[in-house]
Image (cartoon, rainbow, N blue to C red):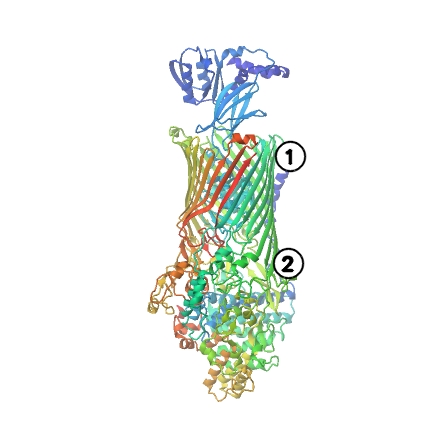
Amino acid sequence: MQIYKTRKWGLRLLPPVLIIRIMKLTAVLLLAITMNVSATGFSQAVTLNLSNTSLEKVFKEIRKQTGYVFFYKTNVLKGIPKLNISVHNADIKETMEACLGRLPLSYSIIDKTIVVSPKEILEIITPQIIVPDIQVTGKVTSETGDPLAGASIKLKNSTIGTATDATGRFALSVPQGGGVLIISFVGFESKEINVSREANIDVMLMRKDNKVEEVVVVGYGTVRRSDITGAVSSVSADKIMQVKAISTVAGALQGQAAGVQVIQRSGQPGEGVSIKIRGTNSIAGGNDVLYVVDGLPLDGLSAQLNPSDIESIEVLKDASSTAIYGSRGANGVIMITTKKGLEGKPKVSYNGYFGVQSLRKKMDLINAGEFANLQNEANANWNTDNPIQPRKPIWTQAQIDSLAAKGTDWQDLVYRNAMVHNHDLSVSGGSAGTKFYISFGYFDQDGIIENSGFKRYSFRGNLDQKINEKLTTNISLSLQQSNYSQNNYFNADGGGGVPFTTMVMPPTQGVYGANGKYTVFTGVPWGQTNPYAISKEEHRFNPSLRLIGNATLTYAIVNGLKLKLSAGLDNSWGRTDYYAPSTLSLYVNGGAFENYSNTSTFVNENLLNYNRTFNKHAIDAVGGITYQASTSQNLNSGTATGFLTDIYQSNNLNASSVKAVPGTGYNDNKLVSYLGRVNYAYSRRYLLTLTGRYDGSSRFSENHKYGFFPSGAVGWRVSEESFMQNVKAISNLKIRASYGLSGNQAIGNYQTLGQLTNQNITLNNIPVTGYYLSRLENKNLKWETTKQLDIGIDVGFFNERLLLAADYYDKKTSDLLLNVTLPTSSGFSTVLQNVGAVGNKGFELQLTGRILTGNSLQWNSILTFSHNKTRILDLGKDAHGNPITYKEVGAGGNWFPMILGQSMQQLFGYKVLGVYQSDAEAVANGEPTKKAGDYKFQTAPGNVLANDNRVILSHFEPKFTFGFNNNFSYRSLSLSFLIVGSYGNDIANEFRKYNITLNGKWATTKEAYNNRYIAGKGTNMFDRPQFDNSGSSIRDYANSIWIENGSYLRVRDITLAYDFSSSILKLIKISSLQVYISAQNYITLTKYSGYDPEASWQSATINGWDRGNYPGTKGITGGIKVNF
Amino acid sequence: MKKTVIIIIHSFFLLFLLPGCKKTLEEKPRTFVSPDAFFNSPASYDLGVVGIYRVIPSTLGNNGWLTRESFSDIIAPVSGAYEQGLPVYQNNHKPFFYNVRDQWTNHYSIVKDANFMLKKLDESTILSAAQKSGFTGEARFLRAYAYFQLVQLYGDVPLRTAPLEDLSNVQISRTPQADVYKLILEDLTFAESNLPDNAPQLGRVYKLAATALLAKVYLTMAGNPLNQTQYYANAKDKALAVINSGKFTLLDDFSKVFHNTTYTTESIWEQTYQPGIGGNPLMGNSATAPGFVYIVTPANWFINSFAPGDQRKVWGIKENYTAPSGVLLPFFQKFVDLTYLDAGKPASGAGVSAYTLPILRLAEMYLIAAEAENESNGPTITAYQNINKIRWRARVNKSDPIHVPDLAGLSKAQFKDAVLMERKWELSLEGSTWYDLKRTNTLNRIQTLRPTTLANPIGPYNQTWYIPDVEIQNNNIAQNPLYQ
């Protein structure tokens, strides 16, 4: 080896002019230098004891023991005699010396490749002016051996490059001297290979999403998938865009990640979707997850982000990954990474679809004839306490007969087919120094009820610029204009709620009455103009603009140490224009208001990152200080009523006869945080993560301004151990465990301060401002703390063809921010305190399989499964010092109280045992005021409250939820479908209390009508029709009749796509073109009788309270994806 | 390089700047004031006293009606569409019912606001003596009013005379009702002597309002359950003081007492409303047109009980009223705007009614004077004069002798019954119906008149309502014994 060393030295000492000359040296010289540099690092031991063996076989044996691959031209070994070799525990260098020492062969080692060539070349150092290019050929395949057509092969730092043909082969001329080839293919890990001379190289690329080397975004940094110690689920861009006609990021996550429950609140386009990660932690402190977009924490992100701009989503679930977000991490964190430009030719993409949506299911209601008959019956039965009161007018049989055919089908009138279309256009690209991604998106979705819809215009620009070797900067700007038209559905069974009224409006009424005016629903006191008119004429328009910008500067101080400074701004402006014209009953001669709001958040983050590897020790540490300040203001005009004309709408409130009383609001809060995390890996086998955040929030009380949230995690990559090397079936195995604290700071602003509130009090018929003490000061209020243990396992089978990630977790949230009920004799009904505890235990798993990997037929599949059990562990102590077992919270009232030991709010009320068949039966059962045909209640005391017959009626928490996503491709065709579902959960269908009540005031279901109690022919299912009073007991009291099985299985998406072949597309300069057709929610298997089993109302802690939500839809869309 | 040095220096500047800013996290609200910073002028005290009135409208709405009107003898069945209405009517109420809870909570809110102001007034150094005593009188009047309702509805109740300073003393036990009445008398007596002669705004209380309320309190104390009959004399004195003050006169026509948007010559204390901001809610619960949910409609026997030519029936009760939807069930007209029904407008808009709601009016003073005189001295001329004044006013045709004839020649017991009946005819729906049944120990009339409508028989326990469940759970007190 001496000779090489000498030459190397010689090279270094040569003056520049000579260096140019030496450029003429053959590739072998360069190889030799390379070898000299890299050989020192090898230490793999080789033991050979071979006699009379061909060199070829020797190489094979070495390859077996070391994994080194040999490269040589077949004629090189010609004439080489068989060898006798004996080495023991030699390193590769020694082994190669032993093999080739006396032979006319030399070798060089490049990474794990040994190139063997004739020695005499060394002697041919002859000056040559023109050096021919070297020819490199090869084949690129996936790890399953399938050829990759269109893979890019590029010479690093040059413009030389090519692509593979349909068989995965390529040929490339590389200038003499060679270089590094970058071989890349979309969806695969790129590979770099040194070439120095003519060679035929076969390259195998590994799929990105299956690789343990994949980089995962976590709070304030990234970690290799293999080194993660926490529980983090990743969802890729194609999965986010899989289900069409979804406007929110949250909605796109349904069924895609284990442990993530997506709750669709309604079918209203643009409506926020709530997400729960690993159950419900908080009773009153809020259960919203924290969204972090490209490192910037954002509040209340719903439909303001264009899902097609997303590159990937990571869901942080355990304490180790969420503790870095401190007092905001307890409910989990959704990390969103938007698309960035890639080095290379600019890429232009267009993605568009068009679709039609319709009501998923129609309710089976009685027709006009049946309704008239019901009114007659109800009337005849209505006499018990007021015999002389006048009867309601009765329909004659002739009238009933004539009605039977006619009547109004309100569902047909109100619900329509609605279109949705979406267009995304993006341009991305970049050079070595600059990378950019620019996009424009347009999303337009109509609701199936008139005057509801969502339109979004979104712009995004992401720019990465390398300033110099040490300094890089990044700026991202996004702008969304959302136009949200909201239908009247949130009023549920009051105030003209359209879905509710559509269901109960009598079919005997028409849209217009005899006087030519709109008819009014009078079945309830809060009934309003018929739903058709409300949906047509009531306008609630909410345009909003959100601007999000973030700029970062990264400075590499010294090797491994980086400083990152960032400043972000999140600004949103919102407006609501409301107008109800005089033709509606909602206001006297019309009502209108305008509301304006503006929220502005500034975030500054200063992070120091240190990332070094010392021998077997790898350290990745981050520390930083962040500051966040939010201010929001709003102006509400108040409602003006009484307009002479409808033309003003909300634009001229001064023209009203009854003036509006305006109001304004102001809120601000600040957060100052210190955070740090150390990831340590020993030998890449033993992993340790320590995280902490010290959070100071203005919302916390004087005595508790700062909270500390630490966490720790360990991981063991068992598959890296030598004893696992022989287990071929398992390609990766990691066991991990974490424990830590994260918080929930969802105290409203100023909640800890004493408050004197002003209120308008009517004196002398005018409002006079009065003041009263509304809140006592609370100096001890602090965050909720969630302690979480997570034990997880990641396994890859059969060379990562089947991946399993499974986690068990046990969380306990204590110091709940709970409104402690006070004896109201104190003058205060509640006070916010840190009381009580909630536990969540669960199990979740994700199975990812590449089930079929053939050349033409492929099948990939992801199954997610989540099981969670929420338990209320503590609600504090009552005045008598006993544990509180029952507590009413928020919107749930005494229908949905919190009960100790249960999972959050449950329906609490009376069990309905059937219908009394005789008056005597009612008396015997302790309900003397009830008669035959009335609902029979269970009158035995329940076991929750003393002397109270009410019992727990529901089980709202699913036993498990799941998602099953499949993707088949056969040549140019691909088919995907996503199945989601939930099992073992109840729904409180409050619709039931109306649509089975046979009082002749509102339409009922056919089921109730057909199975009603008729004296003498008594049935046991529904009560006796009776004007005014039928069903009153099932409306007055929460009861078991509302409860239904809410389990469902839904085919959320089916997409059939066709990709045009690249050879045709090349002619028209299109690099790829896909057309597809897809169906959303077309199949739903459920026993639930309401519009949609995915129902929830108001408070996030009561899932499955259906009280007149905007019904769910199904849809068909078709679209194209083009890349230029 | 220079640039990066600047950046590093800048970032470290931030690093050291932030921890120094503990003040950064101090909250400075801009939409409300701190209780300590507010009271700095006489006007601010005035606004604090006005604040005490904020809950009164809530005590007079449907929950007030359910508790004080619909559980009575004169009312027909409550609509099954009114949540928890029927069970109340059927004597099947529960400690968690809205009306039981709200009547308790709302009146204690008044007590809390009054106590808070009394403390602030006591500490004040910037008010004149007259201002201080005037505001104090007003706050004490309102506190007495609230306790007067509480003690009648619930019996012995926790007595708070100072604001809650912190959460260590939220739990206090019940005070015997006689002692509660003692505080009521002290407060009202103080108010009577310190309140101004005229209220600064319509809807606020003044001297004679305190006198009138005292008349009512004395009458109540003299009756069941305290039976401190010595107070009949005080009741009569106070009632006559109001009658003879010359400040008020009875209107000739009963129908003119109602459907007003401001005080009449008969008004002593009324709640006024402003449509659009807060309307009178009671129309929604007495009209019987489709969509309206009635909780007070007249019982048949009650409709039939009026003498001929009684405006309180002729005008006051609408029988067979025809609306666009057809013939309506009988309903009380006191708070119903017929133009609304005629137009076929939905019930939801009923809150737009601006009709005032009487809390104290002169007619009741005549009836108190009559009753108290009869109880003290038997049916004297004074007693007849006072009751017949009200009967005279009720006559549709003042010159028709058979129209609501003057009473004469009754025994003391007959007179007592007559006054009680007169109160039902005159004051129905004005919040006294259940109180009168309790005070005169005649709750059993409900059992007698409508036994089949009761889930549980009327008993002594009906003399109070349940203490609400939330109070029992969170205060260390027991349920009213007869309910246990």
Label 1 sits on a secondary structure element that is helix
Residue B349: % across, % down:
55, 65
Q: Is residue A371 above or below residue A260?
A: below
Q: Quadrant of residue B213?
A: bottom right
Q: Which residue is mark 1?
A: B5
Query: Given the image, on which type of amino acid does mark 1 rest?
Result: Val
Q: Is residue B344 above or below residue A706?
A: below
Label 2 sits on a secondary structure element that is loop
Residue B251: % across, % down:
59, 80
Residue at mark 1: chain = B
Q: Is residue A741 something that shows in the picture?
A: yes
Q: Foreground: B243 or A825?
A: B243
Say if labels 1 and 2 share a chain.
Answer: no
Crowding at dot 2, Cα within 10 Å, few <14 / some 14-19 / many 20+, comes out as some
Q: Is residue B95 something that shows in the picture?
A: no
* Quadrant the C terminus of chain A occupies: top right
Q: Which residue is mark 2?
A: A648
Q: Foreground: A515 or A568?
A: A515
Q: Foreground: B482 or B340?
A: B340
